[in-house]
Amino acid sequence: MLALGKLLELTLAGREPAEKTQLTVEGVRMRWLSEGALEVRPPQARDNGLDLLLSAGIHGNETAPIELLDRLLHDIARGELKPCARILFLFGNPEAMRRGERFVEQDVNRLFNGRHELSSGSEALRACELERLAASFFSLPDRERLHYDLHTAIRGSKIEQFALYPWKDGRQHSRRELARLRAAGMEAVLLQNKPSIVFSSYTYDKLGAEAFTLELGKARPFGQNEGVNVSRLETRLKQIIEGSEPPLSDAGLDGLQLFSVAREIIKHSDSFTLNLPADIENFSPLEVGYVLAEDIAQTRWIIEEQGARIIFPNPKVKNGLRAGILVVPTAGAHLA
């Protein structure tokens, strides 16, 4: 196996490879760009015009997606997986990965779309570098652009595997991409309706990619991910990489639950309280009239929406950040 196939090993050790560029027997070029960043180019004759960005480790303790990318890289480096797409592999927060922590000082996935310019420290610099790497990768004209940012969650979920689809004014969500997500094992998709400061929102909004945050199960340490089933996603990613995907159709949306954002719960002060059990699962239903949260100046969030569910509840975020999202079922009437 080519040494660059061991990107994860290099990243966890904090080492640079001796050789920055290597070729497989079949002419696939692997090029180390910077810490945790590796570009894969197929031979020109096999290039099908797709640029695929695969990122994981934006949160350093979410190891199942990191291990998934590691397996794909190994297969490419051994010549077992034969790319027809250009691919950029990114391990988002190497220092947090080495420590086995979500982040060191700041949540990198709240520092995109310019937010890093308002901050300082190593993680703000890393968010800036990730934007630069993605922008450079997606700079070639007339190519299809696809980004999957892979995560696992702090808590359990009533819907274990789901995706978040970013929003941009004037751009419609794609039925084809939803069918692709369903084929990859996603049970639900949250169709967002406002700008965001996460990585997939940056590549969707600023770089024109079809981009998604994928939540794949519960976060566990390296080597303990038997309970996180990514087999359907792994199969689909291999098919995308090799250009061998079965045809996608509207029928592929069968069984896919669609949600929209009703409200974001923003923590304004240290007085903020979230009236939920600490171990509540994502997509837990909430009754109309329930007092979800309270904050300074007698601010209260009361459930008004029928069918409301909560995702990503976290009262420990910094003031000014999102402490949870209220979502409701949607029919997806405005899909392209």
Image (cartoon, grey):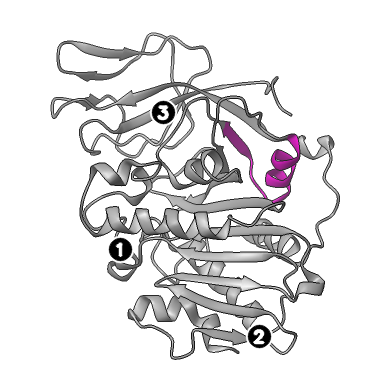
> In the rendered structure, which amino acid carries the disc numbered 1?
Ala
- The span from disc 1 to disc 3 (Cα, nearest Å) is 25 Å
Q: Type of residue at label 3? A: Ile
Q: Which residue is mark 2?
A: 78
What secondary structure is marked by label 1? helix
Q: Report helix, strand or loop for mark 3.
A: strand
- Label 1 belongs to which residue? 96
Q: Is residue 131 rendered magenta in the image? A: no
Looking at the rendering, the stretch of residues picked out in magenta corresponds to 175-190
Residue 327 placement, left or right of 279: right
Q: Are marks 1 and 3 in contact (CB under 8 Å)?
A: no
- Mark before the other along the chain sequence, 1 or 2: 2
Measured Cα–Cα span from mark 2 to mark 3: 42 Å
Left or right relative to 16: residue 163: right
Q: Which mark is residue 325?
A: 3
Tell me the residue at 62%/82% (across/down): 77
Q: Which mark is residue 248?
A: none
Q: Is residue 188 visible?
A: yes
* Residue at horizontal 65 percent and vertical 51 percent from the top: 145
Label 1 to label 2, Cα distance in Å?
28 Å
Tell me: 121 left or right of 11.
Answer: left
Q: Nearer the viewer, mark 2 or mark 3?
A: 2
- Please tell me whether residue 179 belongs to the stretch shown in magenta: yes
In the picture, which quadrant includes the C terminus? top right
Residue at 30% across / 49% down in the picture?
107
* Badge 2 density bin: few <14, some 14–19, many ≥20, Cα 10 Å: some
Mark 1: few/some/many CA within 10 Å (<14, 14-19, 20+) = many
Residue toward you, 4 or 64: 4
* Position of residue 256 measured from the top left corner of the image (x, y, whole percent): 69, 35
Q: Position of residue 84 (x, y in %)?
A: 75, 68
In this picture, is 312 found above or below 234? above
